Each structure stands twice: as structure tokens, then as C-alpha cells.
Image (tube, rainbow, N blue to C red):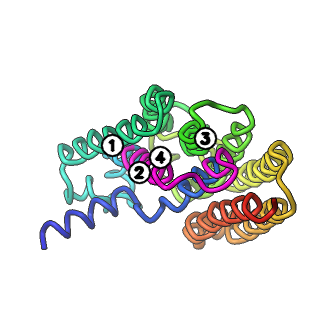
Amino acid sequence: MALFRSIGTTLEMIKWEHSVLTLPFGLTGAVLAARGIPNLRTSLWIVVALVAARSAAMAFNRLADVTIDAANPRTNIRALPAGKLSKSFVTWFVVVTSAILILAAYELNPLAFYLSPVALGIVFLYSFTKRFTRWSHVVLGLAMGIAPAAAWVAVRGSLDPRILILTAAVIFWGAGFDILYACQDYDFDRAACVYSVPKAFGIRKALGIARAFHVMTVVLLTWMVVAFGLGKIAIVGVVFVALLLIYEHSLVKHDDLSRVNAAFFTMNGLVSMAFLFFIAGDLLLGR
């Protein structure tokens, strides 16, 4: 029973269920690279690499933010500040999941292997940026945005500049919804030495910046569809994503943040999964 509790606590620490936010966009990069579904071996190692990278990043973030989380009433119940997991356990978790990422990259191709430490450096960097820049949300977006480019490299063993359009779209998408999420900590950020867009500009303007970022997301996704010569199904996918983002922003008001979690997890999970579905459908059915 103790083992199962530890596993459950660890999965809660890394927000396992939130893998649905980035994994589909990573797999979108893979299906674009393969112009369909990659072979089973490649697909499995890509999934292992993406999950390991996200797990390492989340655990590293919990280590880096343990003092901040302990001081914040919203986060002081997390595993580390609450004493449910030890720092040594979480450190080893970061080491092991990082090693799994590197192993998965090695199994994919030489370029993926050589770039795996760079990917780890990017995803770890985010944990420190909130200490010195209000634009830490963009760095988080970058940590998410490298997923489709990494998946492309995993399939092709090379990098095509066109996949960087999807990377840019994910950067703005991730930064936009992270700004929405950060509005919950506006009062704490003002009192603490934590930088954020809501702290810098206020909640009303922060919501406007998040909307602007998501407009850029739709523009970039449209550009990506054109760049890859995709068809009507992919275009419908972009329209569907745009509608989901409009609804997401309708859930969050400057004077009512009660539905931020629904906007953050439910809607963005649908955005990433829907886009993968439509792009894969276009490649498989639109030929």
C-alpha cells in the first residue's frame, strides 16, 4: 500500500494527467515528418522520450520552486513542501527520467541523441526564469514548443525549418494559457519576488496579452497548414482550435477566475488532441 501511495504522490507531483497538453503536439510533429503514422518502434520511443522529458521537467520545477511553493497558499499542499516526498527522491526521479529521455533519443537516431541534453537544458531553464523576468511564460512555451521539432528529428534524423512554425505556434499557445493560469497567483506574486505578466501589467491587461498570444497561435497554425501543403481537413482543424481558444477565454474574466482550471486543463487538452486528430486525418484521408 505504501508503494502505491508513493507512486500516486509522484504522479500527482508531475501532474501526469497534464501530459495530454503537450504530447499530442509532439505527435503532430511526428505525423507531419512521416506524412502519416510513423512505424510502431519509432512511435513508441517518441512517446517514451516526450513523457520522460516532461516528467523530468516537472520534477525539476518542483525542486527549484519548493521554497516558493511552501510560501504560496495555493501550492503549499504540493508533495515537497507538504513533506510527502523527499528532495533526494525527487532528485533521483529527475536523474532517472532524464536518463530515460537520453536512452530514447539514442534509440531513435544520432541527431536526436546529440540534441537530447539541449532539450533537457531548455526544459530545466524555465524553472529559474520567474525569478528574473515577467516573460517566463514564453520560456515555458518554448519548453513545450520543442516537442514537435524534437519529434520531427526523431522521425527524419534532420530538421526542416517548416516544423519550427508549429514550434512557434506552441510557444504562443503555451505562454498564453500559462498567463491565464498565473492570474491565480497575482496577489502572491506581488508580495513575493516572483515575476509574471499578471504581476507586471495587472490581471485585465494580462488577459489581453494571453488573447493576443492565442491569436498568434491561430495565425501560425494557419501558416503551418499552408507551408506543409495540407488540405481542407487540416484547415477545419485550425478553425476548431480557434473556436476552442475563444471559448477558453470566455471562461476567464478579470474579476472572476473561478474557472481558470477548466480553461487551463480541459480546453487546452482538447486543443492539442483535436489538432493532432485533424492533422493526422488530413494526412491519412486527404491524399
Query: Mark 2 falls on what kind of element?
Result: helix
Q: Which quadrant, please, contains the N terminus?
A: bottom left
- Viewer-closest of 194 and 260: 260
Pair 2/4: label in front: 2
Q: Which residues are magenta?
A: 30-56
- Viewer-closest of 37 and 144: 37
Tell me if mark 4 has few (under 14), some (14-19) or many (20+) residues whose alpha carbon lies within 10 angstroms of its own.
few
User: Distance between the Cα atoms at labels 2 and 1?
Assistant: 8 Å
Query: Mark 1 falls on what kind of element?
Result: helix
Q: Which residue is mark 3?
A: 152
Look at the numbered discs 2 and 3 and tell me whether their residues touch, using CB distance below 8 Å: no
- Residue 72 on image: x %, y %: 39, 54
Q: Indicate which disc residue 191 carries.
A: 4
Q: Which residue is mark 1?
A: 100
- Pick whichever of labels 4 and 1 is earlier in the sequence: 1
User: Distance between the Cα atoms at labels 2 and 4?
Assistant: 40 Å
Look at the numbered discs 2 and 1 and tell me whether their residues touch, using CB distance below 8 Å: yes
Q: Residue furthest top?
A: 114
- Residue 45 on image: x %, y %: 43, 48
Q: Indicate which disc residue 48 carries.
A: 2
Disc 1 residue type (three-letter) = Ile
- Pick whichever of labels 2 and 1 is earlier in the sequence: 2
- Residue 135 on image: x %, y %: 61, 37
Look at the numbered discs 4 and 1 and tell me whether their residues touch, using CB distance below 8 Å: no
